[in-house]
Image: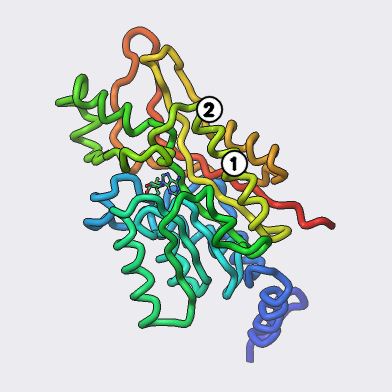
Amino acid sequence: MKKFTKKELNPEEQKEKERLQRKKSFNGLTAKEWASLSKNVWNDVSSPRVKKHLDHGATFPEKLANRFIQMYSGEGDLVLDPFLGTGTTLEACRNTNRHGVGIELNERFIPYAKEVCKQSTLGNSVNLQVIHDDCRNMLNHLEEESVQLMVTSPPYANFIQRSVEDRKKTHKTSLIKHANKSTVNQYSEKEEDFGNLGYKEFLEGLKDVMTKLYKVTKKGGYNVWVVKDYRDTKNKIPYIEFHSDLAKIGEEAGFKYHDLIVWDQTGQRKLVLLGYPSVFYTNQNCSFLVVLRKPNGN
Ligand SMILES: C[S@@+](CC[C@H](N)C(=O)[O-])C[C@H]1O[C@@H](n2cnc3c(N)ncnc32)[C@H](O)[C@@H]1O
């Protein structure tokens, strides 16, 4: 029979230790599970892109939302995505047994998100809801302090619009368009669409959203923003530090800047030559995952 040393737990003891750890942690994770999820550079979250993703042009992978949901919520908690797009966050909720609610302004993407909810009613007991509205109206749809986790990727001001224009004029045959299979499209012509706002107006809009998110987030709950920094070289702005502007807005609304994770996307994008041989720009091949937390009052 195998002898166990003092430090080594037998399988029954190990099971009991893990049961107690799961009970203690709000997300139901053991110490070992948290350790494996707690890397702050990610390069293993890509998921296959199907028609709806190509049609939308700016979706994030289900695995990315799924990982955040495991990290910052427990089974049965409510997860919100105020810029829902095709409903990827709801897909991750369905796969992890969390309730989910998403808000999307543009009717073009609503059927994709509603399809995710239909699949859920067939399979399990989570409650998934799609709201067709401007997310600045979220207080009409959500109760205060009801959301454990918000996961979202907002438009990056009018970055897509400018990028579409640029490609028409200057990148007809470039690697940006062809090797990286980029399919960017403007979301809509609507005034309320954050993708149609200049950067200053856009940050004002986000301040409004952030204040409302603070109200609907539970004490101790988390808000995760998937964003990219970018350049506006035409207007002689070499670098727009969107992720830090966002974190500042979050702090002004009352959140704590809790964590920063880098999503390394070099595997999905080929390098292109930028600014050579004069100003020497690097490629922007990563996204920043900004984690904010509402203080829990202790
Ligand atoms: C980057 S995409 C999100 C994609 C999503 N993560 C997915 O995987 O499908 C941003 C979305 O925000 C939506 N949007 C823009 N302005 C909005 C507003 N004021 N309220 C709600 N949604 C808005 C756009 O239509 C777009 O679908």
| SS category of the residue bearing label 1 | helix
Q: Residue at x 70, y 69 (%)?
A: 25
Position of residue 102 relative to residue 159, above or below, is: below
Looking at the picture, which amino acid does disc 1 mark?
A: Asp
Q: Residue at x 34, y 75 (%)?
A: 119
What is the total number of numbered labels drawn onto the structure image?
A: 2
Judge depth for marks 2 and 1 and give the one in front.
1
Displayed quadrant of residue 94: bottom left
Identify the image quadrant of the C terminus. bottom right
Residue toward you, 149 or 209: 209
Q: Which residue is mark 1?
A: 208
Q: Residue at x 26, y 56 (%)?
A: 52
Residue 9: x, y in percent?
70, 79
Q: Does the rendering let one see residue 45?
A: no
Q: Residue at x 46, y 56 (%)?
A: 103
Residue toward you, 192 or 111: 192
Mark 2 burial class by Cα count in 10 Å: few <14, some 14-19, many 20+: few
